[in-house]
Amino acid sequence: MGSASDLFQRAVIALSDQDFERAEKLTNELLELDAKNVDAWGLLANIHQQSGEHGKAIEAAKKATELDPKNIQHWNNLGFLYLSQEQWKEGEKCYAKAVKLPNPPPTIFLNHAWALAELGQEKAALKELKQAIEQSLEDTITETIRTEDRYTKLRPLLKKVK
């Protein structure tokens, strides 16, 4: 076993090389040294996501939110994992927490709107979509909605925002 930072760096390199098995092994070694290392849990979630192990990715991302509940990025990661698995209610809960944290970026509101739209909550989705558009660079969010298939259910709401 190496030092925590050495293990983390080696795991990141293994992940960038798409050596998921090695990346996971190194990250687990790091977590044996420090089970509360929130960056390691986030990395483990990323490793599992990229290797297609979505259930394990969600579990690791949950641990990151438990250890650092005020970190908006951890809520975004967990929420996005849920949404990518069409677990709309769970994803919506994550984004509902994220939008209440200080200074949420426009993508938090966008993904919250996506979850709400998938749940059939058009009025609430419209409110979040307005927030996303107001906070983003001009046309950035609208272009993303128009070009990315996952946001199909938000497209009709764009007309109602303006």
Image (spheres, rainbow, N blue to C red):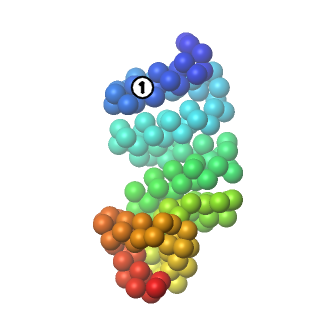
Residue at x-position 50% and y-position 24% = 9
Would you say 22 lies left or right of 69 here? left
The percent position of residue 10, horizontal first and vertical second, equals 47, 21
Q: Residues within 10 Å of mark 1 (few under 14, many from 20)?
A: some
Q: Which residue is mark 1?
A: 13
Residue lying farthest to the top in this orientation? 1
Residue drawn at point x = 51 percent, y = 57 percent: 79
Q: Residue furthest front?
A: 138
Question: Where, by quadrant of the figure, is residue 68 drawn?
Answer: top right
Say whether residue 127 is visible.
yes
Give the SS element for disc 1: helix
**Residue 72, placed above or below residue 50:** below
What type is the residue that disc 1 sits on?
Ile
| Quarter of the figure with residue 108 | bottom right
> Residue 119: in sight, yes or no?
no
Which residue is pictured at 52% across the width and 70% down the height? Answer: 132
**In what quadrant of the picture does the N terminus appear?**
top right
Residue situated in front as seen by the camera: 40 or 110: 110
Using the image as rendered, state which of residue 89 and residue 159 is in the foreground. Answer: 159
Residue 135 percent location from the top left of the image: 55, 68
Instruction: Residue 153: give x, y in percent of width and height.
Output: 37, 75
Residue 83 percent coordinates (x, y) = 44, 60
